[in-house]
Image (cartoon, rainbow, N blue to C red):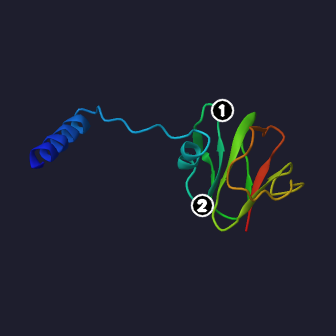
Amino acid sequence: MRKLAKTAAGMAVALVGAGVLMMPAANATTTGVLANCPSGAVCLQEPNGTILSKNIWYSYGAHNLSNVIGYKTPINNQTGGAGMQFCYDRDGGRCSVIMRGTGPSSAPYDFTPINSIVLVR
């Protein structure tokens, strides 16, 4: 039994060292997306799956958008039931209802007419 355990451990070390050991792929609609958006943040995911550092917000209040156009997937990864709103005006004017659901939205949203995002408690 010890010989079998040593052999298995040795093979695992060899595979990891060679870069052969593969981990199962994460589900892109849940785990992978949330992993890209830090805990406690609201993010906008690009159509190619990336999240630009300028599109990650942590603090409550209005955040003006700059050159954010086209379809993006909003992700609410805040904790404690915090929500977000999309606003047509800068500094949080003419906003949508508060969305408190966590994770990615059901579908990408056109952010071309949106000028700010508000994070609310």
Closer to the camera, 93 or 5? 5
Within the image, what quadrant is residue 49 found in? top right
Q: Residue 116: where, in percent of width, then height?
A: 78, 51
Question: For the C terminus, which image quadrant?
Answer: bottom right
Local SS, label 1 = loop
Residue bearing mark 2: 40
In percent of the image, x 62 and y 41: which residue is there? 29
Within the image, what quadrant is residue 44 found in? top right
Number of numbered markers = 2
Q: Residue furthest front?
A: 1
Closer to the camera, 27 or 75? 27
Q: Residue 114: where, in percent of width, then height?
A: 81, 44
Q: Residue 103 — which label?
A: none
Q: CA distance from mark 1 to mark 2?
A: 22 Å
Give neighbour class at mark 2: few <14, some 14-19, many 20+ (Cα, 10 Å): some
Local SS, label 2 = loop
Of the residues shown, which amino acid type is indicated by label 2?
Gly
Q: Residue furthest left?
A: 3
Q: Which callout, 1 or 2, points at the residue further toward the start of the chain?
A: 2
Residue bearing mark 1: 47
Residue 107 lies, with reference to residue 59, above or below; the image says above
- Horizontal relation, residue 105 to residue 35: left or right: right
Residue 24 lies, with reference to residue 81, above or below; the image says above
Closer to the camera, 90 or 9? 9
Q: Residue 4: where, in percent of width, then height?
A: 14, 43
